[in-house]
Amino acid sequence: MRIKNTGYNSALVLPTGAWKAMFVRGDQMAQTSAAGLDHNGPIGATSIHSGKLNGIPEPYKSACEGALMLPMTGGSWQMLLFKGDRVCWYHWDTKVRSEGPVTELRHADGLPAWGTMLPVGYREGVDALLMDSTAESPYWTTYVFKNDRVATIDWRNGCTRECRIYEGAQPTAGWAKLPAEWLRDYDHVLPLPDVSSAKRSLLIKGGNGCVFNWNTGPEKTGALTTLMPELAALPAPYTTQYKPIVGRWSTSAAPNPVTVRVDLDGLGATRQFSGDIDQVNGATRSFLYSFRVSAPAIAASATEVTAVGSVQWKPPYVGCTAKITIPRVAAGSPTPNLRLELRFNDGNVVPYVLPYESAHLRTIDLEIDAMANRAALASYNTATDAVAGPPDYVDRQLTIASAFAEAGIELRSAGTVNEVGTADSGTDLKWSDSELHTAMLHNFSGHAETEQWKLWAFVASRHVNDSTGVMFDVNEGKQRQGMAVFYDQINGQPGYFILGLYVHELGHCLNLQHSWQKNDSGAPLGPRDGRGDLSWMQYWNLYTAEDGSSGWDVFWSRFPFTFTDNELAHLRHAFRYDIIPGGANWAAQGSAAYNTQDPALAAMDDPITDDSGLALNLSARPFAYGEPVTVEIKLARDGRDVTVHRDLSPKSEYLTIAITAPSGITRPFRPLARQCNGHSDDTLTTLTAEAPALYESAYLGAGADGQYFTDPGLYTVRALYTAPDGSRVVSPDLTIRIRLPRTGEDQDAGELLMGDQAGTLMALLGSDSPALQAGNDALAELSDRFPDHPLAVYSHLAQGANAGRHYQHIRDGRLHIRQPDTKDAVTQLTAAVDASTGPGGLNDITLNAAMRRLATVHAKAGDHTAASATLDRMVDHFRAQHLPTHILTTIQDQADTTRRQIIPGDQNRPHKGRKHT
């Protein structure tokens, strides 16, 4: 059972006619009744109950954590006393009947044990227990309360009901009438006398109580001692609340400063502790080790709380057991020092005394910049929207900072929100990931290429891909230091959605993945392959409830504005390197501290059965040494109409690609940025007989981990697509050959494209970022030195695409725009297109995009005739390839849509190959 901060650790109601209750505090006990205080002294004193409790064995006698009065047997009383994961069955006349693990507890031989009856999640950290009746009977029922849920245990038949508390331990009407604050996190639940055959209970939280009628609802709430005459006589120590055992303790004393994070009770307690050990050398202090104790044995007495367990280290270190001891003091008192003892397997013991530092387990400085007239979210009151939060949610005013504070993270403002002027920015205010990264480098005052507890958030206008938010910093240098939300895309949405977007992207910065993608870095998935998680990291339109329902109202009416348990464990106790901005790369294997096992891409194994109605296929030709590797992706219906996500890019959340090198090492392809498009409801389409497939071209040459195809040889590529219904569709393996260079010129040209910066520029299709200057120099050298080499088509493509668009950067608090160089863009893109309309060059999907890009540049230069001719050329080129009709229809639609967008007055003119209707 969890630690209780009431002035007593357990309470029992005696099976007598008149209501009497025992409140146990360590080895002391206070018994109250209508007559007043019957006893205040040792639990085994002969002056109370004829000393029958003196036979309680240790540690139950002095440090039990919970108690449950059982039904009488033969007219005698009996009870259960809990300590850790063990229980003592104590008979008041015959003493100890049994003692052992809770999981082995059973009514009688031959009947089920609690280990088989308790639902998953109820085997530790339980809040309270209530016996349905203590009258003598062969049929026993116990209610087990934990957080906002309750399980009904029939000792003969197992768990007969498990639900939210507001649905009722039994399906009676009173539960739904409880106020939200009385629908979760009970410290104790005691039976009260029935009224008109209606069951009644005393619910206790801290120093308050609720007299509750299971049929009609609450009868009375308030301070516990005011609710009933029998409670008024409780002595002061029993009514004084303890200070919660949660927070951060730290010492800076040389040679090894130590920080300890403790999370044994309080809001969403994970019952763990962790810490960091640094090294002082002269005038410098550097990180040495992180440690974590994930499953400590916790003991609480009237005077102190201890937790002890085996230590996990990162980086790996020697075997060790850690023990923390914290004195218990009254709420409102100064927090005492924490004692840490590291006991190594070689017998060496190292003690520390750490002063209290903060109620937060970590502190992060957050700097926010915003474009003019695009304010950052200030706060959101959950009471303003009826759809927001479940019935047991206590409404409150939330901010970005308070949302993380509830998770144990202090987001400390690094100053006022800086406004970025846009006077000279023009009308196109869309941002690319490269521009966002450059903006962070130039405007994040706290930025450094190192690990540090600092983050940058940017409130921008729109993203080039119409994403609502993005954690863009997964490419250059130290990752996970910056994120952006796009005001113009989300303006007008409900406050709960906007708040969720900020928290979601900042969660990515702290190495949290989407709910259904946690296993990519070794973390366990939640219910329904993660789609049942109610979390800040979930997409509302991917959430699936227990009953199979989904949708906006289904998610938001259930979402309690929090992270899941294992996400909280990561935020509070992840090893420093795995969470600190600038530390472990985004989603790196094993970086999820809540489970460091590598699943070895097991999700991409062929499914045992596949009734998804979908087929996923990859295709690619052989590539020259250094040539950017692109793969064509096809998602097709397989016999019936199927709803799918529109986005097939590996930048999306729906497609995962694994690459196996000639060495046999398999790595997931990690794009330069993960875009959170799923917050929108406009992400789905239906594959039909008329439109049976979606197509995409994916550049796989370089990503967040650098270049993937660095050596000649045979590579294997496999893809996994996750459908809206959760189906996992796996492609057949695609073998890609990287050829050896045939000449010295092939070698030199290929190496110009093999650098990480050149790979990044191919992924971004160019950038003005100063951090990528070496890559731009390499592309320019390829175009100038090897103008006729087949690989020059790629430098022309990247240079032309970048020249043909504006580039935004922030300087001196203002947004500045480098205008398109349409002349250079036309030259470069024309060279790329001309080299690709024959047997070599770009693949078909990339060529399609390049030709539409070239038409757009012509239009920007005012040459609408050339723009229209380029689009006609595109349609003619692909028609000559004798492609299927539905593909040609899509290409014609793309040409017509582009024409309407770039040529004024062209909206209604019919074009070659399209009948006007």
Image: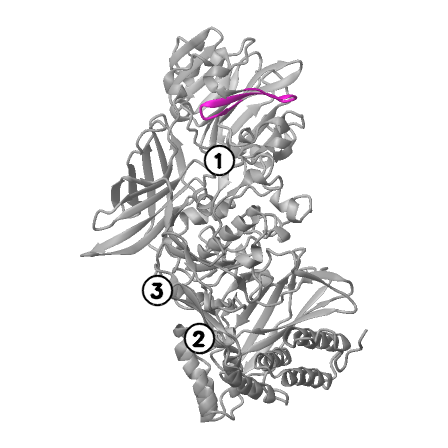
Point out the stretch of residues depicted in magenta: 203-220
Q: Earlier in the sequence, mark 3 or mark 1?
A: 1
Q: Residues within 10 Å of mark 1 (few under 14, many from 20)?
A: many
What residue type is disc 2 on? Asp
Q: Residue furthest top?
A: 35
Residues at discs 3 and 1 in contact (Cβ within 8 Å): no
**Are discs 2 and 3 less than 8 Å apart at CB?**
no
**Can you give x and y, in whole percent of width and height, for residue 730 in the image?**
64, 65
Tell me the residue that label 1 is attached to: 125
Label 2 neighbour load within 10 Å: few <14, some 14-19, many 20+: some
Reading the chain from its start, which is encountered first: label 1 or label 2?
A: 1
Q: Which disc is residue 449 wearing?
A: 3
Residue at the image point whose x is 65% and y is 73% from the top? 901
The residue closer to the viewer here, 523 or 99, is 523
Q: Secondary structure at mark 1?
A: loop
Mark 1 or mark 2, whichever is nearer to me: 2
Q: CA distance from mark 3 to mark 1?
A: 41 Å
SS of the residue at dot 3?
loop
| Residue identified by numbered label 2 | 768
* Neighbours of disc 3 within 10 Å: few (<14), some (14-19), many (20+): few
The quadrant in which residue 70 appears is top right
Percent x, y of residue 495: 55, 47
Q: Position of residue 260 (x, y in %)?
A: 33, 44
Label 3 amino acid?
Answer: Glu
**Colour pattern:** one colour
Q: Nearer the viewer, mark 3 or mark 1?
A: 3
In the picture, measured across the screen, residue 359 lies left or right of residue 894, that is: left
**Residue 177: percent from the left, percent from the top?**
62, 27
User: Circle 2 — which element?
Assistant: loop
Does the magenta run of residues contain 219? yes
